[in-house]
Amino acid sequence: MTGEIVARYTTNRSDLIFLFRVDRSIMTIQPGTPITALDTPQLLIDLDGVDRNLKRMFDAAKKYGVNVRVHFKSLKCTGLARYILERGANGFLAAKLNEAEALVDAGITDVIIANQLIGPIKLKRLAELAKRGSVRVCVDDAENVAQIAKAAEAAGTTIGVLVEVDVGMHRCGVAPGEPALELAKVIRKYPSLRFEGLQGYDGHLQYIPDIAERERRCREGIKSFIATRHLIEAAGIPVGNVTGAGTGTWEFIASTPGITEIQPGSFVLMDAVYNTLRPEFPITQSIITTVISRAPGQYILDAGSKAISKDFGSPAVKGRPNDKVMKLAEEHAIVESADPNVKIGDRFEVYSAHCCATMNLHRTCIGVRKGVVETVWPIESSGRYD
């Protein structure tokens, strides 16, 4: 097929081989190449910015005495995950089973799947994965617990399990208190399972613009979460891990006694929307684009909704605060601009409106430092939903 090759990504599992297409121009990029020489559109990661964001988060977590388990759903790229691990991450959180598989295949074996896995196919995959790493999964249903135990027993392995507690998001999770205690008791009945603790994510609070209101509601929700830990421990059941929070609430959760780890993800990359809420973390993800058309009051870029997520608002053109992205078509961004000097062939970087979804749109990303390519990473879990 013209213009691309098919790269083979083989896992350690004998039953699966993943294929993904990689553009030929990406495969020929060498470290030291200036980004001005790259074809467009292309996803860039500013590694100096990543370093600053990691240091800020990891230093603060040490002060609070909690671990940082970085959410891999924001990254989907094991090369970037290894980079983060080398700089002090305590492990990773996955949203989907395929993400956990990619991490373990890359040698990153401390993983929590912050989701419910249902059905024999996924549970068989989970049980096989647990042979190769410390993989844990969240539950909120006793029947699902029994099914996980059966899969683990059949595979001859043991699976770690956390009870997911609904701290106000009303998505997954059991109610705090007695329901969580009863589920923990069920887990402990099965020799093939380990009860490892509690998971509680306050995703409904992450984008509240008023930080005082965000903190107030976060601290209200966390009270019942910590009380649940005490209730389970009072019943004689050790609770090894109590994990939660996101980029919008991390410091409120981290400073709460009884929390053992936080699990932010977007702080690594950030985007045009999240950065308005957490400006202390600079945006490190951008899409380099080219102006391909010009008209009075606007210009058109060669990247649209297939390359730039607009999930939570409008993307932004880096360094051009007066330009406004008015619309994303599939392959075009229409930008309103009063600048008469913009010309066809100019190149601008664009910040997305959702860094996590943007990673899912690309198959590779380029790590850059001071405008120069340092590394090229495949994004192994992009475009996968299993």
Image (cartoon, grey):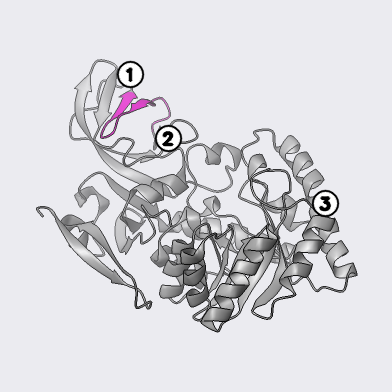
Give the structural element (helix, strand or loop) at label 2. Answer: loop
Describe residue 339's horizontal placement relative to residue 59 as left or right.
left
Question: Which residue is pictured at 52% across the width and 78% down the height?
Answer: 133
Residue 68 appears in the picture as rendered: no
Q: Which residues are magenta?
A: 320-335
Number of residues whose C-alpha sits closer than 10 Å to that of mark 2, classed few (under 14), some (14–19) or many (20 or more): many
Residue sitting farthest toward the top:
296
Query: Is label 2 or label 1 in front?
Result: 2
Give the structural element (helix, strand or loop) at label 1. Answer: loop
Question: Which residue is pictured at 19% across the width and 62% down the height?
Answer: 6
Q: Amino acid at mark 3?
A: Ser
In the displayed structure, 228 sits above or below 190; it is above
The quadrant of the rendering that contains the N terminus is bottom left
Q: Is residue 329 magenta?
A: yes
Q: Amino acid at mark 1?
A: Ala
What is the CA distance from the residue labelled 2 to the residue labelled 1? Answer: 23 Å
- Residue 50, x across and y down, in percent: 47, 57
- Residue 191, x across and y down, in percent: 68, 81
Q: Which residue in the structure is indicated by mark 1?
A: 338
Residue 45 appears in the picture as rendered: yes
Query: Is label 3 or label 2 in front?
Result: 3
Q: Which residue in the structure is indicated by mark 2?
A: 310
Number of residues whose C-alpha sits closer than 10 Å to that of mark 1, classed few (under 14), some (14–19) or many (20 or more): some
Q: Which residue in the structure is indicated by mark 3?
A: 224
Residue sitting farthest toward the left:
2
Place residue 216 in its image quadrant. top right
